[in-house]
Image: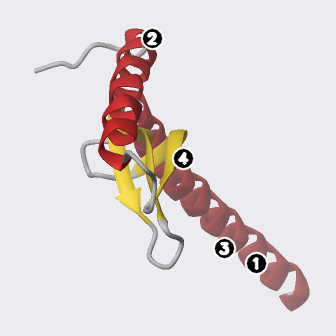
């Protein structure tokens, strides 16, 4: 009789734990999806220390600053002959890509 009671209590506890786990992960998944849907493509550039080049691209960034995706447009070596010209051209291309990628994104509300 004690074994049956123990099994019944164990099943109830495991079911409760499973339901809490499902609820927490579903909420987190919903928040992550909403964050990604409100994210916008924006121009991004950065230098990687020790690599000797600057990366120019577009990044899918949400309101909290998290990057959900990135497209690299150009990697410009630090010692490039005409670094400034290459950088400006890469930024211009990145701005055009961001514009076209944002056309498919939902409009910004507010």
- Distance between the Cα atoms at labels 1 and 2? 49 Å
The quarter of the picture where residue 1 lies is: bottom right
- Distance between the Cα atoms at labels 3 and 4? 20 Å
- Distance between the Cα atoms at labels 3 and 2? 46 Å
Disc 1 vs disc 2: which is toward the camera?
A: 2
Disc 3 vs disc 2: which is toward the camera?
A: 2
At a point 69% along the width and 68% down the height, the residue shown is 12
What residue is disc 1 on? 10
Q: Secondary structure at mark 3?
A: helix
Residue 28 drawn at (x, y percent): 47, 52
Please name whichever residue, 43 or 6, is drawn nearer the observer in this view of the structure: 43
| Of pointers 4 and 1, the one earlier in the residue sequence | 1
Q: Compared to 91, does 28 lie above or below?
A: below
Give the farthest residue toward the left: 110
At a point 77% along the width and 70% down the height, the residue shown is 11
Picture disc at residue 104:
2
The quarter of the picture where residue 2 lies is: bottom right
Disc 3 vs disc 4: which is toward the camera?
A: 4
Other residues around mark 1 within 10 Å, as few (<14) / some (14–19) / many (≥20): few
Q: Is residue 108 left or right of residue 2?
A: left
Other residues around mark 4 within 10 Å, as few (<14) / some (14–19) / many (≥20): few
Verify CB contact (< 8 Å) between mark 3 and mark 1: yes
Q: Compared to 60, does 46 lie above or below?
A: below
Residue 71 drawn at (x, y percent): 54, 37
What residue is disc 3 on? 13
| Of pointers 1 and 2, the one earlier in the residue sequence | 1
At a point 66% along the width and 73% down the height, the residue shown is 13
Q: Is residue 20 left or right of residue 34?
A: right
- Distance between the Cα atoms at labels 4 and 1? 24 Å
Q: Secondary structure at mark 4?
A: helix
- Distance between the Cα atoms at labels 4 and 2? 26 Å
């Amino acid at each position: 009789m004690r074994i049956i009671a123990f099994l019944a209590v164990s099943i109830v506890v495991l079911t409760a734990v499973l339901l809490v786990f499902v609820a927490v992960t579903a909420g987190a998944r919903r928040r992550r999806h909403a964050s990604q849907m409100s994210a916008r493509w924006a121009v991004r550039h950065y230098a990687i220390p020790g690599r000797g080049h600057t990366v120019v691209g577009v990044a899918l960034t949400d309101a909290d600053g998290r990057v959900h995706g990135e497209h690299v447009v150009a990697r410009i070596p630090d010692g490039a002959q005409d670094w400034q010209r290459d950088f400006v051209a890469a930024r211009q291309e990145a701005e055009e890509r961001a514009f076209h990628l944002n056309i498919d994104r939902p409009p910004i509300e507010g």
